[in-house]
Each structure stands twice: as C-alpha cells, then as structure tokens.
Image: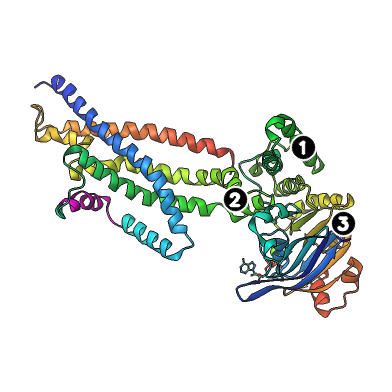
Amino acid sequence: MAILEVQHVSKSFGNKEVLKDISFSLEKGQVLSLIGSSGSGKTTLLRCLNFLERPDGGVIRVNGETLFDAGDAVTGQESEIRKKRLHFGLVFQSFNLFPQYTALQNVMLAKELLEKEKPDYKWRKKEIHAQIEAEAKELLDQMGLSDRMDNYPHQLSGGQCQRVAIARALALKPDILCFDEPTSALDPELTGEVLKVIKSLADQETTMIIVTHEMAFARDVSSQVIFMDDGHIMEQGTPEEVFINPKKERTKQFLSRYTEG
Amino acid sequence: MEFSEQLPIVVQALNQGFLQTLKLFFVTLLGAIPLGLIISFGSMSRFRPLSYLTKIVVWIIRGTPLMIQLLIIYFMPGLMGNNIWGGGESGRFLAASVAFVFNYACYFSEIYRGGIQGVPKGQEEAGLVLGMTKSQIFFKITLLQMIKRIVPPMSNEIITLVKDTSLARIIALQEVIWAGQSFMKGNQGIAGVIWPLFFTAVYYLIFNGILTVLLGRLEKKLEYFR
Ligand SMILES: Nc1ncnc2c1ncn2[C@@H]1O[C@H](COP(=O)(O)OP(=O)(O)OP(=O)(O)O)[C@@H](O)[C@H]1O
Ligand SMILES: [Mg+2]
C-alpha cells in the first residue's frame, strides 16, 4: 500500500487556480522529485500536504488514513490538523530556524513541547529530556554538525543552517519529509553538502518529496519524478521516463533550459 | 539669604517636584505598555471598522501636540459643567496621567505593530509544521524576537517620556520644573533666582543617564541572537 495518496487536489487563491486536479501516490521509502517552472504550484502543493494551506478539493491519505477530504468538513477541523501535520515534515527554502535557539535547541524544541503534553512527563522529566537530547545530538552528528551544536543560527553558514533544519524536521520522525527548494538560497559551493545529506537520507529509505531545480540531483536520487506546469501534473514517471524520454513537448522545452548552457 | 542657606530649601523643593515627575513617568509606563498592546491588536484587527477606527485615533493622538491633549483633557470636563478630576494637585495628576497614558499608548502601539509584523511569517510556519500550538509559537518563538525588535525604539520613547513629563506643567502639575520656576517668582523667601532651574536639568540628566545604561544593558542582553 502506498504511504501517501493524493487524489484530485485543487487549490485556488482568489480566482486564480494554482493546483488543478493533482493526483499521485508515493511508496514508503521512495523519493519523489517535483520539478517545474516558477509559479507552477510546487510550493503550494507542499504547503497543502503540510496543512499550511487548505485545498479546495480532493483527498489526502497517509498509510490509508484519510487526513484530508474536502468533502468531509470534519477532516478540516483545526484541532485535528495539528496531529495530522506530524505525518509530514517540511524543510523550507529559507531554513526558518529559530534565531534565539542554538542548533541543538532548534532540533529539540518541538519534541520537548510534545512530550510536555503527555501525562507522565512530570515524573520522567529528566529521563525524557536526556533521551530527546541524545536523539537530537545523534541527528546533528549524522548531518555532520557535531561541532556546531551550541552555535546560534547566525553563527552558521547557509548550508549548515539547512542541515540543522533537516535535523529539526527529522527529530519528529515524520512519515514523509518534504523539501521546498532546499538549496535555492545557498551559494553554489554550499549546495553540495546539503544535497549529500539528502542523498544519504534517500539511501536510508527515508520517504521524501523534493521540490528542486537541481535536475542532475533529482535524476540521481529519485524513484519518481513529477513535472508540474501551470498547476497541472504535465508528466510523471521514473527519472528515465521523465528526463530521458519525456513524452510531452512542454517537458522537453522545460528540460532543455537545464541542458543548454 | 546666603546661597548656602538657599541650597537646602531649593533641593528639598526640587526633590519633591521630581518625585511628582517620577510618579507621572512610572504611571505612564505602567499604563501605556499594556494599553499600547491592546491598541496595536485593534489596529491589526481583521475587522475593518475596528482597525480603521483605531488607526484614526492613533493618527490624531500622534499628529497633535501632547500639550493640547493635556489642556483639553484637564479643562474640558470642568468647562462642560462636570469637573470629573476633582480639585488640587491630585486632580491635576489624575488628568495628566490619563493624557500621558493614552498618548504614549498610541506611540507604543505603533512600535509593537512594527515588532509583531517584523517577525517573518516563516517563523510561525516552521512552528506549525513542527506541531506546535499557536500559543506555544507565540511564547516560545515569536515573543522574544518581538521584544528584541521593540527594545531600541521603546528606549527612545522612554527617554523622551522623561522629558515630556515637564509638559504637565501647563496644567500646573507641581513637577520638578514647576518647583524650579517657583524660585523665580518667589517661594519660601527666595525670589528672582534662575539657578534652581539649572538644577532641574541635572535631575533629568542623571535619571536619563541611569535609564540609558539600563536599557542599553537590556539591548546588549538580547544581542546573543539575530
Ligand atoms: N498566498 C497566496 N496568495 C495568492 N497567490 C498565491 C499565494 N501563494 C502562491 N500564489 C500564487 O500561486 C502560484 C503558484 O505559486 P507557488 O509558490 O506554488 O509556485 P512554485 O511552483 O513554488 O514557484 P517557484 O518555483 O517560484 O517557487 C503563483 O502564481 C503564485 O503567485
Ligand atoms: Mg516555490
């Protein structure tokens, strides 16, 4: 069974239709790359999955559980949304780290707040804290940041910030981790270190959806590629199908921009 | 009277006047800091009539001299046949407090608004995506960033407030300048001397000096992040 099923999702801002009948599914442990030109709706799609935007139509299912159904008002209730969000993680283009916390604190904060709400937190405070800290340190270590844990975001490079942001998202163990152009805000020499980390996550079979303009990377890392154009899914398939033998003229046109020059 | 005889009399009067200055200063801060927050919420309200109304009031209060506001607030009720302030120094103090609190709350509200809107939307979104509640996001993430943003402009307003308290002299509130001036006209056998007025300046300088150091420290404390 697919870990994620998206069916007929649509979304408009005012009278501008930004997502039109988006349907796809994703298997556990696979990586989906979303490509497409600026304004085609990639960010909006990720934001819908993370409940930062509410779709106007369609269904979103994770592990067979219906998280959102535009036809069923109950699934859109604010109180429920918070829990459902935890199925997804989101890494932003602009990192959005919390500036007043160190790298380690950034990774620990959300988990700690969640644990605090549990009834047994009071009694096992120390133990829980130690466990969260150990996990956070291990994640940062995995991101190659063991010597940066006590630095504040402004003391880190863009690439380091983005790796902290990835660790922060992973700390909540989301079923599906989404990336919105994770390297677009980085200097070219720093993109490599972030892509390497994402590649290693792919090797560990982390289920991911990656919006990217790094075509070579997308080809290398993904099991499935979706090319979006003007709110539609124009073409989807394996990297070979989309990158090497695209069927649609629009896809060829788009890809040619990356091969030339 | 010898200068050495005049000095203790003057200092005693100035101390008393400065006490009134300090009282007005602290009452204004205590009232305007929370009231300003309420006004800033009003001006950011999605309910249009409320936000327009608030913005117009803020525009009027910030666009007219505090001195006019003081005069109107103090004298208008009496002239309309109902002196709600009561007589004497306590009545003047009450009226001055109302005028100052309201005036400063309007200035503070604009500073708060800048501070609140200055925190990038991405901060809240990052919190939401991490499963935090709105109140967790406010208290754990945005509040401190807002405070950091508002401390420098608030410091400026607070220093200005110290000096603005002297405006209450226009309704004869017996603050420190009123006390200093009294020795020009004649008070306790001392008349026609200007030097007590210079002394009042020293009170302002010292108090503002202390405030500048304290507020500077607070600003420094928040410098550990950007
Ligand atoms: N909150 C919003 N209100 C109104 N229009 C919006 C909003 N968010 C996005 N849009 C519009 O929706 C369209 C799709 O935007 P989106 O950000 O999803 O595109 P994108 O594929 O991520 O583009 P890019 O590659 O530039 O990031 C754009 O035309 C954009 O102007
Ligand atoms: Mg985008």
Would you name the residue on which mark 1 appears?
A137
Which label lies toward us, 3 or 1?
A: 3
Residue B58 placement (x, y as % from top left): 36, 57
Describe the element under mark 3 as helix, strand or loop: loop
Which image quadrant for residue A92?
bottom right
Q: Which residues are magenta?
A: B64-78
B152 vs A27: above or below: above
Instruction: Give the secondary structure at mark 2.
Output: helix
Which of pointers 3 and 1 lies earlier in the amino acid sequence?
3
Q: Tell me residue A166's x, y (percent).
A: 75, 49
- Measure the alpha-carbon separation of dots 3 and 1: 26 Å
User: A89 and A104: which one is in front?
Assistant: A89
The reply to whether residue A94 is in sight is: no
Q: Amino acid at mark 1?
A: Lys
Amino acid type, callout 3: Lys
Of A249 and B40, the residue lying toward us: B40
The local secondary structure at tag 1 comes to helix
> Which dot marks residue A28?
3
Q: Dividing the image into four equal quarters, which quarter contains ligand 2?
A: bottom right
> What is the quadrant of the C terminus of chain B in the image?
top right
Colour scheme of this structure image?
A: rainbow
**Residue that protrudes farthest toward the bottom in the picture:** A249
Q: Is residue B90 visible?
A: yes
Q: Amino acid at mark 2?
A: Lys
Please state the horizontal and vertical placement of residue B167, each as a whole percent of the image: 24, 44
Q: Quadrant of the N terminus of chain B?
A: top left
